[in-house]
Image (cartoon, helix red, strand yellow):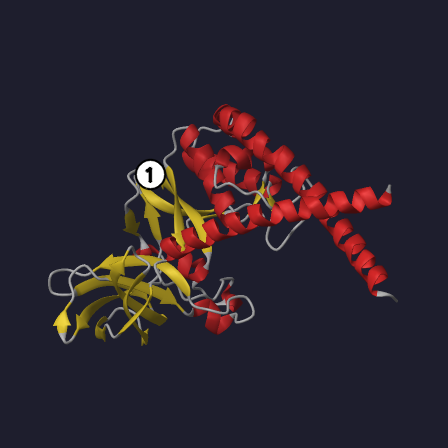
Amino acid sequence: MSTNKKWNRLIEVMGKASLLFLIVLLIDVGSTIPYYYLYAKKHGSDKIPETANKIVEGINDDEQKVRALMTWINSNMESSYLAIFIPKYPFINIFRPDDPNWTIFTMYGGCEEYADLFVALANSINISARTVYNSGEDHVWAEVYIDGKWVHADPSIPPNGLLNDPGIYERKRENGGWGKNISSVWYRDSKGRIHSVTERYTNVSKIKIKVLFDNKPVKNATVIIKSWYLKGNHPNYRKRPLFTSITNKTDINGIAEVELGGGKYTIVAEKDIFKNIIGYRSEKIFRIGENNEYFYEINLKKISILENPRTILSYLLDAFVLSFYLLLPVLIVLAIIYILKKK
């Protein structure tokens, strides 16, 4: 085959692929994003209480209302785990805003969408609820306020959700549990502050971490804790330890304190030099039991790119958006060339 024919063939293949990609992109972006911003965000706040009131109609007891909400969610939500295509609108699992006003219309998502929708439905009928996060083991559920206390509620567990069984995550599989080691569980209040509720779900140990540089305590260093549970027990699922979302700052004595369930962890200690991107950094792997106290020292040694999860994620997102906009014109040109050549 001549070079010219090979080139034409390459243009044809790339053009077809580009055209198909653009069609899929236009379907997704052209419908779901406007639908979210122009309709779902506006009308979801009305649909959520309307739906909740229909679900609990005729029920007077708060606990039974909570059970009815979880059963309805579990029966109607479509799980999006590992699915590119889903059997209901928007059909393509690309655009997933973290907003129950979106979920109430699309009714698809993962454990966080299940929990957020449940919380929104419960709060809309004056039952206080909040989303809680177990980031280190990659799960999200809810807590609901019943009879004067906060109670575990996980609407993502089939067939009817699960109420007031906080031990399910650590209970052995042969006893009906998940067999996990819980690292930390937390919620975020209305002002964005993080509060630990780990003691409700596991026995915790108290850990003091002292950060040093040249054997001197470092004030205001960032201490990040990462859980090894999924990497150790499900290596094909997670290749690296997961952030627990515990990111404490050291005090004037260079000490940060955290509470964790038993397991294997990595401490990452950082001291910023330039805009949370570059700084001094060290890490240490450790294993702890439950109901104990531990003390670790970690010396900052090398200058490195920092590992603050929010900072890194924001830069990665910016890079992705930039590369997408740079690539889009190329794809459009390839698609146009292909169309013109077909004519």
The residue depicted at 76 percent of the width and 50 percent of the height is 15
Q: Is residue 203 visible?
A: no
Crowding near the residue tagged with mark 1, few <14, some 14–19, many ≥20 C-alpha atoms within 10 Å: few
Residue 88 image offset from top left, x and y in percent: 68, 39
Can the viewer see residue 146 in this picture? yes
| Quarter that holds the C terminus | top right
Q: Position of residue 45 (x, y in %)?
A: 47, 26
Of residues 137 and 25, which is closer to you in this image? 25
Residue 284 percent coordinates (x, y)? 31, 75
Disc 1 residue type (three-letter): Asp
Residue lying at 40% horizontally and 52% vertically, measured from the top left: 133
Closest to the observer, 280 or 232: 280
Residue at 66%, 44% (x, y): give it. 92
Residue 20 placement, left or right of 188: right
Total residue callouts: 1
Q: Residue 91, located in which quarter of the rendered image?
A: top right
Q: Quadrant of the N terminus?
A: bottom right
Along the line of sight, the residue nearer the viewer: 283 or 301: 301
Name the residue located 51 percent from the left edge and 40 percent from the top edge: 97
Could you tell whether 186 is left or right of 88 in the image? left
Classify mark 1: helix, strand or loop: loop
Query: In the displayed structure, would residue 149 be above or below residue 43?
Result: below
In-image side of 127 versus 208 (left or right)? right
Task: Return the x and y of residue 306 as percentages of the image width and height.
Answer: 33, 63
Q: In the rendered image of this protein, does residue 168 appear above or below residue 156?
A: below
The residue where tag 1 is placed is: 147
Check the image and report above or below for 199 versus 150: below
Image quarter for residue 307? bottom left
